[in-house]
Image (cartoon, rainbow, N blue to C red):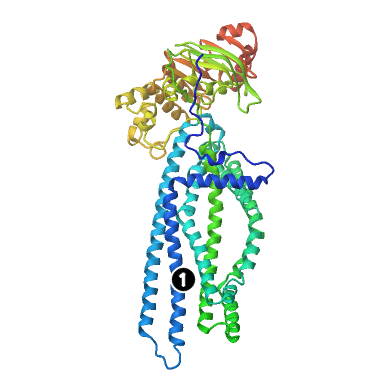
């Protein structure tokens, strides 16, 4: 027997988060370690550009102090020349030249720092979006059914955008916020150590209040992001379903669902922000310019009166002390952005680590389009079986219908054939080859599906039809649309096949189904899955859809699911599922004669149809 080697391991995803977690540590700390490692790994491709930005940022921050030192030296040269000694004009010119040169160098260094980091940000966003697209294209199709669209959009768009400030600005700002205060305090220490202490006199108040304010920030941010993802999902759901909602008069209920998500998010946000705002006021006051100025001036006057420092040195301390709070506030904003980016990186890595569809190292080509379910079992969660030991054969040129109550496993079987999921037991074979041994692109050329929930892309009608066959010509489009009973409707559009869906081409549910059928006809797959294609169609549309399906099913291996039993009476075999197992199988006439479950379902169906007339 041939073994299958798969390439579904974490392709091009960070490895730093995969280390074994130490035991006996705080879970929150372990989570922060994982998140930080994920962020570092994501940024690794642009580390060199980032380091260049940091170097120039540090140079720019150091040059910021030169004007203050120049002011002190200028004051010393003007006010303390000594008895009988004139002011040295050359010394003044040298000080001015050094200050001007420092300003120019600082401006150039700051510009280069941001240029390098913005280059890094643009490159990183390109890399991540490409990786995201590749990963989303490689995951099993069933993953999309299990994942909220709002979560995918947030990770693929918002979370990548959230890395912008961190990559393009944070490192430069953080470097300046560290280098400038440290260099400033060092310079004041060189003048007099008491001036350095005076410059940071209010800093302890800020640090204590800030540390208290940031307790549990990461966990709260994670909760806020989860709440926002729910709001995004509610918006997407409301917009996508607005037509059906309005038709059935349920706009109020749909609004309620969205309103509940928004209210929950708002309450959680308000509960977090209220106590933080009081501490925020204290931190702002501790680093406000008036408070710093009063403290520095009072201390400088006292130090000067005691003869510890000169008036020029005291004035220099005031100016440096006023600069330090601005850098600390920048550092504060940068740390907030970093925490947000860390949370975003964790979600990006989680998405990039989504297991891809296992692909055989040496794929095999199916011989024909005979479908076989061999002792198939399946569970979504790994514990509760949805299908148990199902055996079924679907022969080429025949129609196999699956019927049963809700939850019997019909849709699951339909999703397993195009490999939305992999079976947890047994095997599904196409042309004698296990689906897991067939390359995905080959499988999708062999197996097509028409689902009840039709998705038309924002593009022309022709583009939508060509999804399964991009090289189809105009005559092919017309032939497929004619066979699907939708050609006349398309010609009635303002620009015919060039009309854009959602703009000058708006289709009803039945018409969208016929577009989907035309798309399947054009793809011309030998195996076809029809999942309740007429479930929500009106009688006129249902008749047209049935005609189109008859053309589509001709000569193919067809697996169909239908709640309306009248639509599958002509099937070559009907399989009755009950609790994930095959309860009965046979033709319509055979099953009626057996008087079993299908016969009871048929009697109930005909009574319901009769009472509805």
Residue 6 visible in this rendered orientation of the protein: yes
Q: Residue furthest right?
A: 24
Residue 149 visible in this rendered orientation of the protein: no
Q: Residue 108: percent from the left, percent from the top?
A: 37, 64
From what the image shows, is residue 116 above or below residue 352? below
From the viewer's side, name the closer residue of 343 and 184. Answer: 184
For disc 1, the neighbor class at 10 Å (few under 14, some 14 to 19, many from 20) is: many
From what the image shows, is residue 433 above or below residue 327? above
Q: Quadrant of residue 521?
A: top left
From the viewer's side, name the closer residue of 235 and 299. Answer: 299
Q: Residue 57: percent from the left, percent from the top?
A: 44, 61
From what the image shows, is residue 231 above or below residue 467? below
Residue shown at 48% from the left, 56% from the top:
171
Residue bearing the label numbered 1: 65
Mark 1 secondary-structure assignment:
helix
Q: Residue furthest bottom?
A: 84
From the viewer's side, name the closer residue of 492 and 551. Answer: 551
Residue shown at 56% from the left, 52% from the top:
339
From what the image shows, is residue 9 above or below residue 152? above
Q: Residue 179: percent from the left, percent from the top?
A: 50, 64
The number of numbered badges drawn on the structure is 1
Q: Residue 243: percent from the left, percent from the top?
A: 51, 37
Quarter holding the C terminus?
Answer: top right
Residue shown at 36% from the left, 80% from the top:
93
């Amino acid at each position: 027997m041939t073994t299958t080697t798969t390439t579904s391991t974490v392709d091009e995803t960070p490895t730093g988060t995969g280390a074994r977690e130490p035991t006996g540590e705080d879970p929150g700390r372990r989570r922060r370690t994982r998140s930080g490692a994920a962020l570092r790994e994501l940024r690794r491709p642009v580390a060199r550009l980032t380091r260049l930005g940091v170097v120039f940022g540090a140079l720019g921050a150091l040059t910021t102090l030169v004007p203050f030192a120049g002011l002190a030296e200028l004051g010393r040269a003007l006010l303390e020349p000594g008895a009988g000694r004139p002011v040295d004009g050359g010394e003044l010119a040298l000080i001015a030249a050094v200050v001007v040169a420092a300003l120019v160098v600082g401006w150039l260094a700051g510009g280069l720092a941001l240029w390098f980091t913005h280059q890094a940000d643009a490159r990183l966003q390109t890399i991540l979006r490409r990786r995201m697209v590749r990963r989303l294209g490689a995951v099993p199709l069933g993953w999309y059914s299990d994942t909220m669209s709002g979560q995918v959009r947030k990770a693929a768009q918002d979370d990548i955008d959230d890395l912008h400030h961190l990559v393009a600005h944070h490192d430069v700002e953080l470097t300046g916020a560290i280098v400038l205060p440290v260099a400033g305090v060092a310079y004041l220490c060189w003048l007099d150590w008491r001036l350095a202490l005076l410059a940071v006199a209010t800093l302890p108040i800020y640090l204590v209040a800030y540390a208290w304010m940031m307790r549990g920030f990461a966990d709260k941010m994670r909760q806020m992001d989860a709440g926002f993802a729910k709001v995004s999902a509610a918006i997407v759901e409301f917009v996508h379903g607005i037509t059906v909602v309005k038709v059935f008069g349920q706009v109020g209920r749909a609004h309620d669902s969205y309103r509940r998500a928004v209210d929950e998010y708002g309450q959680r946000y308000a509960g977090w922000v209220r106590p933080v705002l009081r501490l925020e006021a204290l931190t702002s006051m501790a680093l406000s310019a008036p408070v710093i100025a009063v403290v520095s001036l009072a201390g400088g006057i006292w130090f000067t009166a005691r003869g510890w420092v000169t008036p020029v040195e005291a004035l220099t301390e005031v100016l440096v002390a006023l600069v330090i709070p601005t850098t600390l506030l920048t550092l504060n904003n940068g740390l907030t952005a970093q925490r947000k980016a860390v949370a975003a990186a964790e979600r990006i890595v989680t998405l990039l680590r989504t297991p891809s569809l296992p692909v055989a190292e040496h794929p095999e080509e199916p011989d024909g389009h005979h479908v076989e379910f061999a002792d198939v079992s399946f569970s979504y969660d790994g514990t509760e079986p949805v299908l148990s030991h199902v055996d079924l054969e679907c022969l080429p040129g025949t129609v196999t219908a699956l019927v049963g109550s809700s939850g019997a496993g019909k849709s699951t079987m339909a999703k397993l054939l195009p490999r939305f999921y992999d079976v947890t037991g047994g095997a599904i074979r196409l042309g004698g080859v296990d689906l897991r041994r067939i390359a995905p692109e080959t499988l999708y050329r062999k197996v097509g599906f028409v689902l009840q929930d039709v998705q038309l892309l924002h593009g022309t009608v022709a583009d939508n039809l060509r999804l399964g066959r991009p090289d189809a010509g105009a005559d092919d489009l017309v032939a497929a649309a004619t066979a699907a009973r939708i050609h006349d409707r398309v010609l009635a559009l303002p620009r015919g096949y060039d009309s854009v869906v959602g703009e000058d081409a708006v289709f009803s549910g039945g018409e969208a189904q016929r577009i989907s059928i035309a798309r399947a006809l054009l793809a011309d797959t030998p195996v076809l899955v029809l999942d309740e294609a007429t479930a929500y169609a009106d009688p006129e549309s249902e008749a047209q859809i049935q005609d189109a399906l008859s053309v589509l099913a001709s000569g193919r291996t067809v697996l169909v699911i239908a709640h309306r039993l009248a639509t599958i009476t002509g099937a070559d075999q009907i399989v009755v599922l009950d609790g994930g197992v095959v309860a009965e199988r046979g033709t319509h006439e055979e099953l009626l004669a057996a008087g079993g479950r299908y016969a009871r379902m048929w009697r109930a169906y005909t009574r319901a149809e009769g009472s509805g007339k």
